[in-house]
Amino acid sequence: MVESYQFLGVWVNALTIEDLNELVRQSVQRGERWLIANHNMNSLRLFHKDAKMRDFYARSEYIHVDGMPLIWLGRLLGYPLRREHRVTYADWIDPLMADAAAENWRVFYLGSKPGVADRGARILQQRYPGLEITTADGYFDARRDSEDNQVLLEKINAFQPQVLMVGMGMPRQEHWVLDNMDSIRVNAILTAGAAIDYVAGAVPTPPRWAGKVGLEWLFRLVSEPGRLWRRYLVEPWFVLWLFIVELWHRRRKTD
């Protein structure tokens, strides 16, 4: 049974990498379409400010935690979250691709700049012989009825993937999935951020020890300050406010 916890206004599931691979396996075996999302500090802010993001998460079968700060905040609120419940794609993509190769799952990766995803896919195929993976870059007209989008949907469905990874950054990837998931014939839909950018070397991969101790954000900030300064230096104050409000409400209930 997958444990679920609600705090800071959102639901999350306590899932490890092994749990997530098993969920993908179950979606394939049952022939069902499951949306597996994730929450981090950035998504919390977007969730509370963007109605479309709330609709996206409402349609998700499972939501894993991508960020040690959420693990810490959940534990401070009394939930039995553990370090291994923090799953980022920098850690998950290799175990996922290993299982995909072993289980003969076809993988479609949508996202990244032109050429980057292709380079990452070739690297993954070298690591995991037999892996069936194809890609499309994220530079297209993402409006649901655009010609670009219709061509993309046809390409995805023609490939007949079991796993669709969408890595176009928040909230664009979530908006695209919400708009198009009913038109996609696939089992597991994963919103994957910069997963294949790390593999391709287009974005520096943070040291894995940094993620385990909650300092991955600092590495990413130093690597991409122009793009990420607001996310890591401004947006966390919104999450802190959510945490303070939740503590206040809980205290009122116990008084």
Image: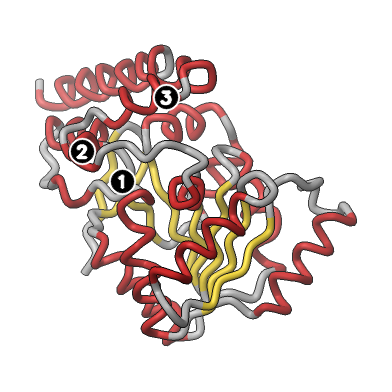
Residue 195 location in percent, x, y?
46, 50
Q: Residue at x 44, y 46 (%)?
A: 198
The answer to whether mark 1 and mark 2 are in CB contact below 8 A is yes
In whole angstroms, how far apart are the C-alphas of marks 3 and 2? 24 Å
Q: Quadrant of the N terminus?
A: bottom left
Residue designated by label 3: 223
Query: Which tag is nearer the camera, tag 3 or tag 2?
Result: 3
Relative to 62, say whether 241 is above or below.
above
| Residue 108 left/right relative to 215 | right
Decide which of tag 1 and tag 2 comes sooner along the chain: 1
| Residue 39 left/right relative to 75 | right
Q: Residue at x 49, y 44 (%)?
A: 194
Foreground: 48 or 92? 92
| Residue 154 left/right relative to 5 | right
Secondary structure beneath disc 1?
strand
Residue 43 location in percent, x, y?
45, 35
Farthest residue, direction right:
147
- The image quarter in which residue 99 lies: bottom left
Decide which of tag 3 and tag 1 comes sooner along the chain: 1
Relative to 121, say whether 236 is above or below.
above
Query: Which tag is nearer the camera, tag 3 or tag 1?
Result: 3
| Residue 187 left/right relative to 19 | right
> Which amino acid, by three-letter code, is at mark 3?
Ser
Residue designated by label 2: 71
Residue 87 location in percent, x, y?
29, 50
Q: How many marks?
A: 3
Secondary structure beneath disc 2?
helix
Disc 3 crowd rating (10 Å Cα; few below 14, some 14-19, many 20+) is: some
Decide which of tag 3 and tag 2 comes sooner along the chain: 2
Residue designated by label 1: 65
Secondary structure beneath disc 3?
helix
> Which amino acid, by three-letter code, is at mark 2?
Ile
